[in-house]
Amino acid sequence: METLNLNLVERLRCTKSALSAQELAKILNCTARYILKSAKAGNIPCYRIGGMVRFDPVIVAEWLNTR
């Protein structure tokens, strides 16, 4: 399991731009709906630009590393 988490964390850290819910869901192997619900509940760090929800890959990698 730790190897899997390190691979995800490293993959996120190498990402250069903000991720959409769909992109993050693909990386984490879950649904975009789950990502958006978790973001709305404050469980996954995110930021909003107008009506869009975006995820900073470095912040998400740090968040995953602490879990």
Image (cartoon, rainbow, N blue to C red):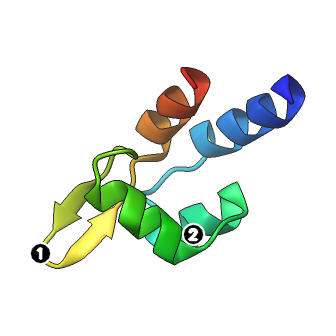
Q: Is residue 23 left or right of residue 57?
A: right
Q: In the rendered view, would you say 60 is above or below 17?
A: above
Q: Is residue 63 left or right of residue 12?
A: left
* Rendering quarter of residue 61: top right
Task: Give the x, y percent position of residue 6.
Answer: 77, 29
Task: Give the x, y percent position of residue 27.
Answer: 68, 59
Q: Say which residue label 2 marks.
A: 23
* Rendering quarter of residue 29: bottom right
Task: Identify the amino acid type marked 2.
Answer: Glu
Q: Residue at x 34, y 44 (%)?
A: 45
Give residue 50's mark.
Answer: 1
* Rendering quarter of residue 54: bottom left
Q: Residue at x 60, y 73 (%)?
A: 31
Pointer 2 local density, CA inside 10 Å: few below 14, some 14–19, many at least 20: some
User: Mark 1 or mark 2, which has the lower sequence index?
Assistant: 2
Q: Is residue 20 visible?
A: no
Q: Residue at x 23, y 54 (%)?
A: 47
Q: Is residue 22 left or right of residue 36?
A: right
